[in-house]
Amino acid sequence: MNRIAESELIINSRGAVYHLDVRPEELAEIIITVGDPDRVAEVSKHFDSVETKRHHREFVTHTGYIGKKRVSVVSTGIGTDNIDIVLNELDALANIDFESRTIKPKLTQLTIVRVGTSGALQADVPVDAFVASTHGIGVDNLLNFYRQENNEEELQLVSAFVTHTQMGSKMATPYIASAGPSVQKHFVDGFHHGITITCPGFYGPQGRVLRLGLTNPDLVDQLTNFRYGNHRITNFEMETSGIYGLGKLLGHQCLSLSAIVANRVQKEFSKDGAKAVENLIVKTLGIIGGI
């Protein structure tokens, strides 16, 4: 087995992976990711016990127990550039022997559930509702740096999306990845389901206009109107496609859950987004505890 060089996998003086500052034994196989570092404590306060707390840069990790189930919650920060760091380092913690710097002969499949916020792109997905993403379509370019593997439905869906939006001519070529079926099946009741678009920014990339003009001022309408069979776009945010894409390539089961804090069609914003997120956290932990 080839040894992974020190420059490729950076391990610090306490034997922890570089950015997360977490050692392999400090990570559970069920992981909740959140964007906001302060949201980690908002999740772990519901744990029955917490055994590990780590904090490095924007990456905060708490590992503990819900009943007898061991769970970690990790902050990612915003954007798929950070997702590239977090997903690769979570996988390294699970599947690379830090002593020999070699890939383990038996790989561990992680369950990774994103709990975040998002903006709805359909009038019937109201603020404070929850979305479980069936697919992530990325217009951020991350997965174009990796060898992608798509099934026929995914290829047809993303091709239809490119034709509909004409993205790819002046922007990054869109890519697609699906939720992990073994975790998705548990998040049905109380959730809207649909495609999530992952954008490389909050303002122009999501069709917001402050002082700058946009190359595609009709973006929100194009996304709202997209249909492919029974599929439609329910929402957009900044991490889902990276989690789904890297998670699938690495062999993990991933799901992105969003509390809707804005509806871009209805021009509404939640009056209590923090409460919506808290409700999603409690619902998610209840489901995870019962899996």
Image: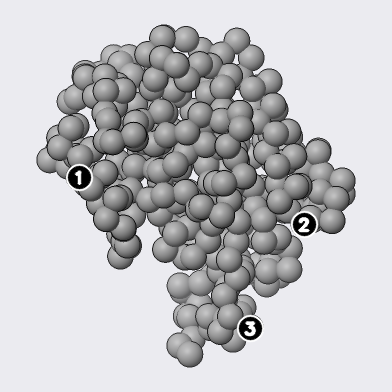
| Sequence order check, earlier mark of 3 and 1 | 3
Q: Is residue 132 left or right of residue 31?
A: left
In percent of width and height, residue 83 lies at 48, 50
In percent of width and height, residue 151 lies at 31, 58
- Residue 268 sits above or below residue 61 on the image: above
Residue type at mark 3: give it. Glu
Residue 101 appearing in the image? no
In percent of width and height, residue 227 lies at 27, 30
Q: Is residue 87 left or right of residue 72?
A: left
Mark 1 and mark 2 residues within 8 Å of each other at the beta carbon: no
Name which residue lies at 85% across and 50% down. Answer: 67
In percent of width and height, residue 185 lies at 57, 46
Mark 3 and mark 1 residues within 8 Å of each other at the beta carbon: no
* Residue beneath disc 3: 99
* Residue beneath disc 1: 159
Name which residue lies at 34% across and 26% down. Answer: 206
Determine which quarter of the picture holds residue 35: top right
Q: Nearer the viewer, mark 3 or mark 1?
A: 1
Secondary structure at badge 3 equals loop
Depth check: give the residue in front, 264 or 126: 126
Q: Is residue 11 left or right of residue 146?
A: right
Q: Nearer the viewer, mark 2 or mark 3?
A: 2
* Residue beneath disc 2: 70
How packed is label 2: few (under 14 Cα within 10 Å), some, or many (20 or more)?
Answer: some
| Sequence order check, earlier mark of 2 and 3 | 2
Secondary structure at badge 2 equals strand
Residue type at mark 2: give it. Arg
The tag on residue 226 is none
